């Protein structure tokens, strides 16, 4: 039995450290100094994730302009940060996205060879990694979504917890009871039992937050029963799709992990499911009746 959980020690160690750091940053996220620290952290994660993706692409002889995308990533995150702090400059984020689109083309004016593949790849990188990270910042600071919301700390906690509980439920159920493979061509260790357990775990944890919402003002956090069931199910499904999507990319690159960080592999391994679930929670908050 224990051989099934040979990597559990490293996972628990990294998870414990992550919970402490994230808990601190989220709890004090209204503090201006912590806000700036969050900007630095998200920028670092974005740049690392882009570097990891660039490494994957090299296995397919595609040379991603890493430094260009790294600069664009920091500028985009900073623009998102500014638009959150000052609603009067909210248009800056859109301007940065438009500028990045043209910058990628301008860069390839001097590097014509491979442009047909490299330009769409650059645009996909931005869409896959940067946009969801920007949306996570907006969930944490939801005044940029609607004037109704005053605090997003419980919403970002909801997003992270429900998404990661999906991973945890799928991991343990798959290790203990998994027989039938879910997607053997993408990730041989993922099983149908794990997928079902992940979905159930997501819905259960979402319902737990519904209980919490009964003790908080609606402008801080409100999640009724039926929306909780639907949102939990969507996170349970799309979180696992995000995991499989990154597995698809790694499988094509013929690598096991996107990096070599003990316990998690890499930034993309850590973010994969959140990249798919962050847009769902963001759209939910955008359309939530107030």
Image (cartoon, grey):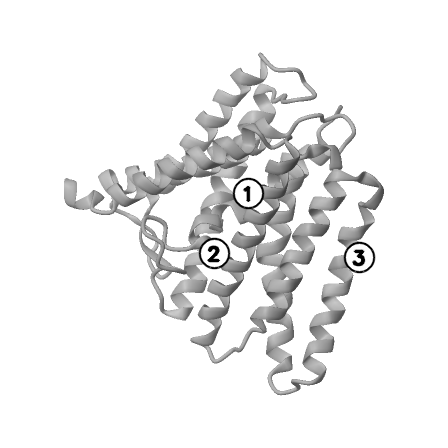
Kindly state the secondary structure of the residue where label 2 is placed: helix
Q: Looking at the image, which is closer to me, 255 or 88?
A: 88
Q: Residue at x 63, y 42 (%)?
A: 36
- The residue at which mark 2 appears reads as 245
In the rendered image of this protein, does residue 22 appear above or below residue 64?
A: above
Question: Upstream in the sequence, badge 2 or badge 3?
Answer: 3
Q: CA distance from mark 2 to mark 3?
A: 29 Å
- The residue at which mark 1 appears reads as 277
Q: Residue at x 69, y 57 (%)?
A: 75
- The residue at which mark 3 appears reads as 95
10 Å crowding of disc 2: few (<14), some (14-19), many (20+): some
Q: Looking at the image, which is closer to me, 290 or 62?
A: 62
Residue 124 visible, this angle: no
In the rendered image of this protein, does residue 236 appear above or below residue 269?
A: above
Can you say which quadrant of the picture contains the N terminus? top left
**Spot occupied by residue 15 in the image (x, y as percentages of width and height):** 37, 39
Residue 114 visible, this angle: yes
10 Å crowding of disc 3: few (<14), some (14-19), many (20+): few
Q: Looking at the image, which is closer to me, 32 or 201?
A: 32
Q: Is residue 164 left or right of residue 185?
A: right
């Amino acid at each position: 039995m224990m051989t099934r959980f040979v990597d559990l020690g490293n996972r628990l160690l990294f998870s414990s450290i992550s919970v402490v750091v994230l808990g601190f940053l989220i709890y004090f996220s209204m503090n201006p100094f912590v806000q700036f620290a969050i900007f630095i952290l998200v920028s670092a994660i974005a740049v690392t994730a882009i570097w990891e993706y660039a490494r994957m692409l090299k296995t397919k002889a595609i040379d991603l302009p890493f430094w260009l995308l790294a600069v664009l990533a920091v500028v985009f995150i900073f623009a998102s940060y500014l638009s959150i702090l000052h609603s009067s400059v909210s248009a800056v984020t859109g301007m940065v996205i438009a500028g990045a689109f043209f910058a990628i083309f301008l860069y390839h004016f001097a590097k014509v060879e491979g442009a047909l593949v490299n330009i769409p790849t650059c645009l996909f990188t931005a869409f896959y990694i940067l946009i969801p990270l920007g949306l996570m910042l907006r969930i944490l600071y939801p005044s940029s979504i609607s004037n109704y919301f005053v605090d997003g700390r419980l919403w970002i906690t909801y997003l992270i917890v429900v998404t990661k509980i999906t991973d945890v439920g799928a991991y343990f159920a798959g290790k203990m009871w998994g027989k039938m493979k879910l997607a053997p061509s993408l990730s041989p260790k993922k099983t149908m039992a794990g997928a079902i357990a992940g979905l159930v775990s997501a819905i259960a944890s979402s319902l737990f937050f519904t209980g919490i919402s009964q003790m908080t003002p609606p402008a801080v956090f409100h999640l009724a029963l039926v929306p909780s069931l639907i949102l939990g199910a969507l996170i349970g499904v799309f979180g696992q799709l995000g995991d499989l999507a990154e597995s698809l990319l790694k499988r094509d690159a013929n690598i096991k992990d996107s990096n070599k960080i003990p316990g998690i592999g890499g930034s993309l391994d850590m973010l994969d499911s959140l990249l798919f679930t962050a847009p769902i929670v963001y759209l939910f908050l955008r359309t939530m009746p107030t």
